[in-house]
Image (cartoon, rainbow, N blue to C red):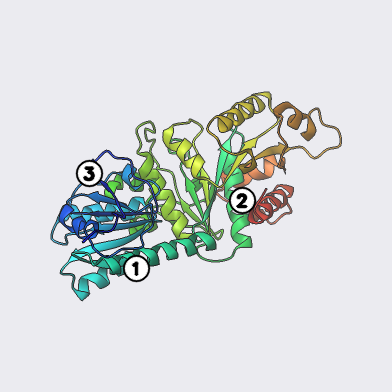
Amino acid sequence: MTKTANPFQMIEKMNAKLSGRSLIVASGRYLDTLRESDEPIRWQESTTLLALPADGELSSGMLSDVRVLVLEVDPGSEGSLRRLATVRALFPSVSIIVALLNANVSLVRTLIRQGVTDVAELPFAPDNLAAQILDALSSQHEIAENGNLASVTAIVQAHGGSGATTVLTHLAQAIANRTPGSHSVCLMDFDLQGGDAASYLGVSPKVAMDALIDAGSRLDADLFRSAVTETRYGFSLVAAPEVIRPIDKLDTDHLLASLRLARSMFEYVLVDLPPVWSDWSLSLLRESDRVILISDLSIAALRQTKRKLALFDEIDIPRSRVDIVLNRMERKLFRSVSESDVADTLGRPITKTLSEEKAQIGASQDEGRLVTESGSRSRFVSDIDALAKDLLRGGA
């Protein structure tokens, strides 16, 4: 009998670069069942086989661009269970089909409750597995079409003291006011050495970003939720650590996993980035749907704004995703520097301007509250609300 053409690309080397929409990871003997099947199977061309034991190391690079993962799991192996937990934490957007030998109903129910998409029996039944993968891919398509992962807006300061955290905290409240709900907005303070959003909001989180960083492979949805602090302003906060953390050796995949967990739980995610660039902060920037660059009219700020815009171009951040916001604009008829002057200097249009209210904002921050609690009218708050409105419409 002539066998049908092998529908899989069999990869034996651990360092092989894997890509595609679906990946099957299992012991070689189980993969042979699929590879040698006499029945033609309608697989996606991008489906890939990877031969690994049930507790074999699966690096994050192997899961690049994977949307559905079929993963062999041995419930009696701590290493195998740890591998599953790590994948779930680092890649929450990947649909996981767990492959089990002698699966029982109780175990299957437990896995489904923990977020596994489906369970396949070992040895594989090719037709059944094909249907399960196609169902998972279909669900992934619906998630992408419906936009169920939250959009991410990153706030970048042109230079220290430009008011980025002030803008960020008030913007989070403005978006929350326009999208009421207990899980609508999350502010993540990734400024690990200078982040001060918690004090601006008058909260004292019991768990902060350092707990997520230190969790390693134990990072999961429950741990992430423990680091979320609800504020009285209608949005949630994941605060920066109280102690200064070194930022040069942080694991990029791990921080991206924290961001993806937030995206899976909230409707909008706002990110405060550190002023010093590193591999992981640039990766967070590239993960963002929009980038708001906060500047003011000082010569130092405008010089740094121009440098950061050049950096964004260099790392291929589309200009359409970058919004320049000028903070602390004086509302008077005659100014030494106008908005059009700044646009000409930068060679880029200015998206929004925010009014100068130094005394009112300073007094509020000293008391650990937002300007909206002062009870008086504020042009700054009105400007922030206009910015939030534009962001929610899909462009600032």
Describe the element under mark 3 as helix, strand or loop: loop
Residue 147 in view in this figure = no
Residue extending furthest toward the bottom: 105
Residue 290 pos. (x, y %): 58, 45
Q: Height in image: 129 above or below 383?
A: below
Label 1, label 2: how far apart the Cα atoms are: 45 Å
Label of residue 171 in the image: 2
Look at discs 3 and 2 and give the one toward the viewer.
3
Amino acid type at image mark 3? Glu
Label 3, label 1: how far apart the Cα atoms are: 25 Å
Describe the element under mark 1 as helix, strand or loop: helix
Q: Earlier in the sequence, mark 3 or mark 1?
A: 3
Amino acid type at image mark 2? Leu
Residue 293 pos. (x, y %): 61, 38
Left-right relation of 24 to 290? left
Look at 21% across and 61% down and name the residue there.
1
Describe the element under mark 2 as helix, strand or loop: helix
**Nearest the camera: 17 or 259?**
17
Label of residue 12 in the image: 3
Q: Earlier in the sequence, mark 1 or mark 2?
A: 1
- Can you identify the residue that label 1 sits on? 131
